[in-house]
């Protein structure tokens, strides 16, 4: 990565520069660790003092935070968004040579764009279709009849079961499994019968799927992840779930079958969502909560209990067990007091 | 998949047909999306109205739901079970050509049935034994001394560590890891010593293991999953656990070492079960519960707290912290009131 | 594994032998299942009666538990630690032949010690450096610029993204993913922008990483796992987390970005830890707890609620919703009573 001038950054990203347009930066850094030549940003007011003492050559800030002095400031309405854009531009994209590595196994019926890259020891099954500039990393397994839009990247050891489709610019991290059977069982007197899972998995464009996340195929119809959905690591998404566009879901979340989540939702880590629910648009669920009923209005929801000293917590749990009894006693006292 | 007549279905599966035995179906569908030629089912009374308006050519229902009119009804005591059987019959099994793909690596000492199929880039280690019609999908890694019964299917990127054995008709989904070391550590003054994990993993027949689920090998003796156990995705099963026959466990459940779970249990999503416990037969644990003590009687158990508006929940958490104090105050008032 | 005399064990591991120094053992076993020729141990007082009836040829115990009789006792201050050491010595190490399996793909620029073993269908990318006796199991994917110290073992289907480094004697179990992108997103009006994740992952020496565990690369600086940290299966560690030396973390734990965990902590299963926190040294968090604030003092912390009968629990949850109201009513009564 070469270096660029602050003037060039300001022009390209529409930022206001307060400082020397000829100063050059060549990397991004945190305020605390930045050296000369680094570009940093201030988004969290908690780090404000570091913006004064940093050795960064320039700092992206809100207008209100651009103080006097000989620091170079790049001013943006949302410094984190501006930082994300500049950093993406400064960071060299991982490149992958077009073509099929000789150790990869590609079914002759697969249709693979000439600009696509199939890495070492990867597999592409029959009738799969891979668009322009798709990168399949080493060891990824793409089964038959999958369809992958332009500019997607499929990480190492990802498994796409048959009939998984995705739009453009999706990023699937290592170890993710898309299209395994949903958990469909019927108890036939004394043993389980497996219910065939014949639906597929459909991802829109710009979807990110974290490492070791699993998205089950639909039982009859498809499991659907809409455009710009962002999934962190180790998430489990059951069959026939639909996740609305622009929703972000943090790590370790589990969503049971047939639940529909709206657009622009934010689901924090470790949330469990029961099956067959509807979650409205713009719902925020805080970490470690259980969602067992549909949520009809936007808002912030929670049921997590913060840890405290175990000794005290044990007493609380004991009292919790008596809560119904406490309520009865309270009622009795109220009656006595009223008399 | 060709089409079949309703008469043929009724005879083969012992269902009562109310309608035209010559009507043909060729696929399964939901009531809502079914077109002519589709077979649907009604199991959840919630969807009863859809059974009247569906375009399905036939619907599997309970006797009580088979209304008059020119709809074709297939009547079954348990429509979901009947659907599962018919759907399995209508759905073409994924086929895999017998033999070893040239890109697979198979140790010469492995014993592999002629009808077994070893997919591209799969590995089978020394002295492994694979029964008739076993299918090893692309990229699965089966280490030495594993034994796999007839008609098992091992998904892509599954890892079987050495000395994992399973009965017949098991289905192991992509990314599952069977036989990694259990978490055995001893603190030797100021650092950890690893306790060797020398047991194995033994699965019975008809076991299903979901994507990215992990089952650790035993510390000394084996970890055991009995017949017809059904495990969803991303479950963690510690060393020396025993899961009883016909038990079903939903996604994201964690079971700590040496716990024994009975037969015909149902463990819902996200349940955490501590180590060294015994759970009786026919225990149901609802989602997002912590099981920290043995359960001796069949029944339904729970400790999940449903999410509510975060603002209200924060007040509740605050009061929860005061619960012991509230109890003391209540007691004091009772004493005063008694005087 | 050949057999060894108790005298040899006593001398080698500094244990006191009460019994026959010429008695031989050749395997480890539990007290309950041991046969002649087996060595067992008694650490949990719960199993004390089994120590009298076991068929083991010798039992490792505390001095206080070494009873009279013709049993052979090996006496240790911490029998579990002594057992771990003896068992490790008795258990043959899995061996792997030095050299590169012909089906592996190794970039010519990678530097691989002659004593290292690269298994079938494994991949080692450009400029990776693998030390003496490193074992890369079948199907592991090691991307470019990774650095792996002597005596590490990388399990099947592990993915190391570029720029992951580790010290010596680390053990990474199958399916683990180190170095996937952290979950860094900025909302740009109506859609997400990905924040480049340019940091790496750094592991110290003697780190163990469980099956299907994920450790994200840092956003700007590195994610750091210090010496002798022990991670169980299916743990999720976010970007820029630091885990202090000798800390052990059980299965299914999730740690959000930028949190720092001290040394000698023990985090039980299913614990969720929010981001940007500091956890002091020697903190113990019990299973199924949510840590949403920094913890400044050593001690035991908890917020898990044990499951009870669902019928009772539903009433408790109902009362929990009324807790704030109950508090108000209690206060009112106190006021009335005071008057």
Image: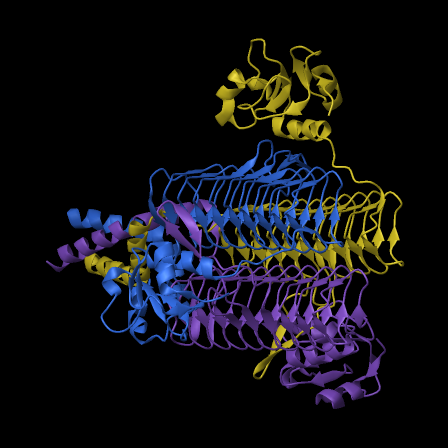
Chain colours: A blue, B yellow, C purple
Question: Between A93 and B101, which is closer to the camera in this rendering?
Answer: A93
Q: Residue at x 39, y 55 (%)?
A: A304
Q: Residue at x 80, y 71 (%)?
A: C99
Q: Residue furthest front?
A: A22
Question: Between C152 and B189, which is closer to the camera in this rendering?
Answer: C152
Q: Residue at x 69, y 26 (%)?
A: B86
Question: Between C117 and C245, which is closer to the camera in this rendering?
Answer: C117
From the viewer's perspective, is C133 left or right of C171?
Answer: right
Please say whether residue C114 is visible from this viewpoint.
Answer: yes
Question: Between A329 and B138, which is closer to the camera in this rendering?
Answer: B138
Residue A84 appears at what percent x and percent y? 41, 57
Quarter occupied by residue C252: bottom right
> With respect to residue B110, does A256 lie above or below?
above
From the viewer's perspective, is C147 left or right of C196?
Answer: right
> With respect to residue B16, does B309 lie above or below?
below
From the viewer's perspective, is C226 left or right of B140?
Answer: left
Residue B123 appears at what percent x and percent y? 78, 56
């Amino acid at each position: 990565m070469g270096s660029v001038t602050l003037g060039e950054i300001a022009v390209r990203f529409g930022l206001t520069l307060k400082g020397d347009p000829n100063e050059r930066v060549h990397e991004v850094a945190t305020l605390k660790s930045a050296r000369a030549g680094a570009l940093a940003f201030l988004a969290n007011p908690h780090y404000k003092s570091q913006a004064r003492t940093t050795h960064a050559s320039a700092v992206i800030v809100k207008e209100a935070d651009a103080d006097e002095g000989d620091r170079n400031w790049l001013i943006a309405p949302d410094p984190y968004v501006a930082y994300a854009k500049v950093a993406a531009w400064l960071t060299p994209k991982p490149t992958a040579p077009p073509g099929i590595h000789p150790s990869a196994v590609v079914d002759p019926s697969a249709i693979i764009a000439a600009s696509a890259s199939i890495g070492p020891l990867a597999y592409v099954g029959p009738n799969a279709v891979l668009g322009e500039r798709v990168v399949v990393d080493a060891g990824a397994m793409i089964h038959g009849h999958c369809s992958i839009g332009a500019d997607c990247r499929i990480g190492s050891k990802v498994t796409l079961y048959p009939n998984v489709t995705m739009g453009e610019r999706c990023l699937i991290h290592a170890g993710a499994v898309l299209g395994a059977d949903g958990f469909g069982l019927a108890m036939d007197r004394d043993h389980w019968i497996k219910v065939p899972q014949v639906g597929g998995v459909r991802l829109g464009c710009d979807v990110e799927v974290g490492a070791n996340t699993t998205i089950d195929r639909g039982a009859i119809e498809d499991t659907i992840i809409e455009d710009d959905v962002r999934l962190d690591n180790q998430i489990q998404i059951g069959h026939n779930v639909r996740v609305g566009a622009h929703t972000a879901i943090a790590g370790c979340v589990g969503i049971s079958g047939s639940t529909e989540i709206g657009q622009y939702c934010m689901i924090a880590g470790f949330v469990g969502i029961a099956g067959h629910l509807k979650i409205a648009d713009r719902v925020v669920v805080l970490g470690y909560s259980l969602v067992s009923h549909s949520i009809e209005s936007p808002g912030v929801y929670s049921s997590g209990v913060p840890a405290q000293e175990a000794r005290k917590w044990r007493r609380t749990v004991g009292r919790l067990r008596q809560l119904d009894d406490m309520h009865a006693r309270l009622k009795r006292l109220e009656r006595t007091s009223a008399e």
